Amino acid sequence: MTEVSQKLTRALLFAAKKHTDQRRKGERAEPYVNHLIEVADLVAQFTDGKDADVLCAAVLHDTIEDTDTKYAELVKEFGQNVADIVQECTDDKSLPKAERKRLQVEHAPHKSDAAKLVKTADKISNLRAILDSSPPDWSLARKQEYFSWAKNVVDGLRGVNAGLESEFDKVYAKGALKFGMKP
Ligand code: ZN
């Protein structure tokens, strides 16, 4: 086993433990780790898995935001590069939700290429989740709003990986059709 795969499996175990009690918001309440693996898999498929740190950051991208994980812990376990990418993918939870969403759009163009990859893959996974197993209490308007907002964020992230960006466009187009929005 290479050092690269060992680092990745260690990140998978770390994230699986940290997110143990979390479920996705969809009607099937999928284990949260499904989302993390999907995001890492998207990054791996569209980058040929070349950069182990980006794959680890993809697996760990929600640890600081959604669990008790601290930046320093990620530095110690996975190195500063991985920790920095995860930090870039972390919203400031002390801010109101609307402000956090606005800042994601505003900050998107200024992210590092690695963070742009992870964030684009994250949005693909989130849109797929709404298409396949949407949260039972979400109205049509809320789904439309989420799709439009995600597109605004991804439009600011573009220019790093054409394949991943076109995968986003495909998922967005499906939603536009299903939820009756302009393509
Ligand atoms: Zn995520």
Image (tube, helix red, strand yellow):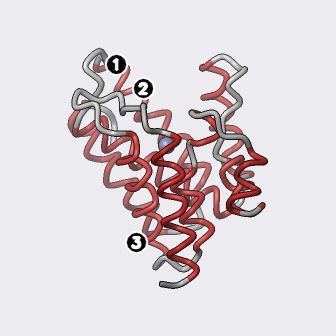
Task: Name the foreground residue: 127 vs 51.
Answer: 51
Tell me if label 1 and label 2 are in contact, CB under 8 Å: yes
Distance between mark 1 and mark 2 Cα atoms: 6 Å
Identify the residue under disc 1.
141
Task: Name the foreground residue: 29 vs 48.
Answer: 29
Identify the residue under disc 2.
145
**Vertical arrangement, residue 18 with respect to residue 98, above or below:** below
Q: Residue at x 35, y 46 (%)?
A: 172
| Mark 3 surroundings within 10 Å by alpha-carbon count, few (fewer than 14), some (14 through 19), many (20 or more) | few
Identify the residue under disc 3.
45
Tell me if label 3 and label 1 are in contact, CB under 8 Å: no
Q: Residue at x 42, y 32 (%)?
A: 22
Q: Residue at x 43, y 30 (%)?
A: 146
Q: Amino acid at mark 2?
A: Glu
Residue 75's quadrant in the figure? bottom right
**Vertical arrangement, residue 37 with respect to residue 142, above or below:** below
* Front disc: 3 or 2: 3
**Vertical arrangement, residue 116 with respect to residue 87, above or below:** below
**Image location of residue 171, percent across then percent down:** 32, 50
